[in-house]
Image (tube, helix red, strand yellow):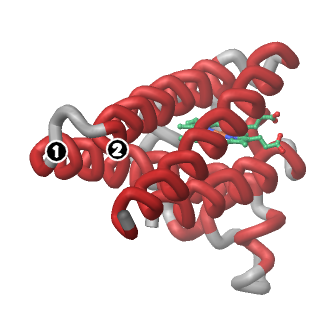
Amino acid sequence: MLLALLFGQIALGGLVAGSRAGFVYNTWPLMDGALMPGAETLFVRPAFWENFVDNAALVQFNHRLGAYLLLALALWHMVSMRRVAPESGGAKRATAISGLVIAQSALGIVTLLLVVPLWAGLAHQALGFMVLAMGVVHVTRTEGAARG
Ligand code: HEM
């Protein structure tokens, strides 16, 4: 689930970069003065589905939501792994993933607040790749361990 959500979050990040949605609503945690902008902002385009790919407000808001969900799931996964087998490699990897997701979220916020300087955009993209690599390693190793 974590890996699937991470794939989705990276795709949403691609939409943010592609539609230059990081150059607007450069505040956090508020966006357009609220935690969640109003429907008149998020669904400004007449075609409902178009908003998900071509409306900077919804594109950016979905990427924020994805990060919160991912962070919650990563922390929950870490706590449950550490409870079952605190010294296992799986628990250590789950902890590393939580740390990477926290760092990636913080970097995403900095990128947004600074209105996407090139170094921050590139660093956020590169760290995203590292989170994905760690997630893939974790899934393959933990599955292998479960099969014995
Ligand atoms: C773990 C959570 C996150 C992951 C895995 C992630 C992943 C990504 C990726 C891979 C991209 C680059 C896409 C590309 O260049 O093709 C991206 C773009 C972006 N993300 Fe995130 N992100 C996360 C959290 C956040 C958060 C919390 C924010 C801010 C509230 C944020 C703000 C941005 C912005 C502004 C861009 C566009 C940068 C640009 O225009 O080059 N991200 N994200």
Does 30 appear above or below 81?
above
In the rendered image, the residue lying farthest to the left is 83
The residue shown at (48%, 35%) is 101
Residue at the spot 89% in from the left edge and 49% down from the top edge: 18
- Drawn side of residue 24 relative to residue 31, left or right: right
Res 81 seen here: yes
The C terminus sits in image quarter? bottom left
Q: Which residue is more in the foreground, 53 or 2?
A: 2
Q: Which amino acid does label 2 sit on?
A: Gly
Q: Earlier in the sequence, mark 1 or mark 2?
A: 1
Tag 1–tag 2 contact (CB < 8 Å): yes
Whether residue 130 sits left or right of residue 148 in the image: it is right
Residue 104, quarter of the rendered image:
top right
Q: How crowded is mark 1: few (under 14 residues within 10 Å), some or many (20 or more)?
A: few
The answer, for residue 37, to whether it is visible in the render is no
Please name the residue that numbered disc 1 is placed on: 85
Amino acid bearing label 1: Ala
Q: How far apart are marks 1 and 2 (CA)?
A: 8 Å
Secondary element at image label 2: helix
Query: Dot 2 corresponds to which residue?
Result: 90
Q: Which residue is found at the position 80% from the left and 51% from the top?
A: 14
Tell me: residue 88, above or below residue 100. below
